[in-house]
Amino acid sequence: EELIKLNLDLERRIAERTEGLVKDITKEKEIDRLKNQLISFTSHEFKTPITTLSGSIETLLRKDIEWEEDFIDEILLGMKDDIQRLEQLTSDWIDIVKIDSNALVLINEQMRIGSFIEGVIQGLKKPPYTEAKIVFKRCEASEHIVAFDIKRVEQVIRNIITNAIRYSKGNPTIFIRVYEDKESIYIDFKDNGIGIAEEHIPKIFDRFFHVDASRTRKTGGTGLGLAICKGIIEAHGWEIKVVSQLNKGSTFTIVIPKNEQVK
Ligand code: ADP
């Protein structure tokens, strides 16, 4: 009986070890997959604006043709777009690498949620933000003071609002609402846009996922926005969720657990 017991114990321990090893290998494979994905993304996405930029420069440098001023302006504006695209790709890429290597450093400061949201909205004075109607009213729940990285969370909110405009059906309206229960504080961003089909919702925070790649490209998205938002929110110990209905609109929610960082 003693021997059977020992044997069972040994079997259990071997099973545990093997499970651990399998988990490590799966994790390594996943990291490899993400690395490869990132490399192919970089080479593919960066090449396009660089190729058009170099084409534009070649054109402007031609000595055999005297370009009209309007044409030169058009080319320069195109070059400006290409450079903006490269800047966006570079900063998104840096953010993703930081998130992957747990190197996202948060500089937390205490701030009242209501004042923070008002400040972010006030900063959205340039296109595309001027196309949207953004509605926010302070309430009891928005008077909580929370410790967080103001710049990073502002980045998340800008991204959610940019998406609400990018995936709108015209006349984008975004309702921001703060509410709470015993456990958490919630910030809702509700839009009246094109919505997301049920089968796409689980993939929405994955990197490089778009429902419609051509729409994303036309409107300047990199497919990394929501993956970065999720990384930033989770680094705070918070959560980000979405509920959506096709052709009706989407609601993105940031969930802030009530802990020692919340007053
Ligand atoms: P990108 O906008 O660059 O494609 P994101 O990670 O920001 O990348 O978003 C991923 C995808 O989620 C988008 O391509 C779009 O299909 C969908 N999406 C995001 N926000 C919204 C929204 N507010 N309404 C409808 N679809 C959205």
Image (cartoon, rainbow, N blue to C red):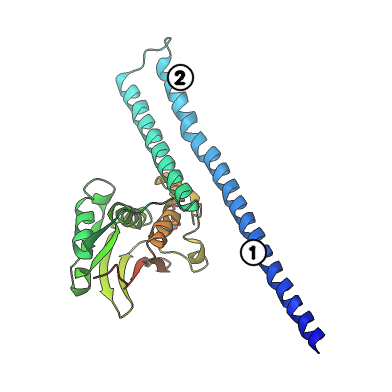
Quarter holding the C terminus is bottom left
Query: What is the number of the mark on residue 58?
Result: 2
Which residue is nearer to you in this view: 251 or 185?
Answer: 185
Mark 1: amino acid: Lys
Q: Quadrant of residue 86?
A: top left
User: Quick check: 181 left or right of 19?
Assistant: left
Quarter holding the N terminus is bottom right
For ligand 1, give the image quadrant.
bottom left
Question: Residue 227's spot in the image, x, y percent?
Answer: 45, 56
The residue most toward the front is: 2
Residue visible at 55% across and 38% down in the picture = 43
Decide: is 211 above or below 238: above
- Kind of element beneath mark 1: helix
Which residue is nearer to you in this view: 55 or 259?
Answer: 259
Asked if the residues shown at circle 2 and circle 1 are in contact, with their CB atoms under 8 angstroms apart, the answer is no
Question: Residue 104's spot in the image, x, y percent?
Answer: 41, 51
User: Quick check: 52 left or right of 173?
Assistant: right
Decide: is 151 above or below 261: above
Residue visible at 35% across and 57% down in the picture = 160
Reading the image, the residue beneath label 1 is: 23
Mark 1, residues whose alpha carbon is within 10 Å: few (<14), some, or many (≥20)?
A: few
Q: Quadrant of residue 9?
A: bottom right
Query: What is the number of the mark on residue 249?
Result: none
Mark 2, residues whose alpha carbon is within 10 Å: few (<14), some, or many (≥20)?
A: few
Question: Residue 60's spot in the image, x, y percent?
Answer: 40, 18
State the separation of the CA atoms marked 2 and 1.
52 Å
Mark 2: amino acid: Glu
Which of discs 2 and 1 lies nearer the camera? The answer is: 1
Question: Residue 226's spot in the image, x, y percent?
Answer: 42, 56
Of the two numbered discs 2 and 1 on the same chain, state the one appearing first in sequence. Answer: 1
Confirm or reject: label 1 Cβ below 8 Å from ligand 1: no
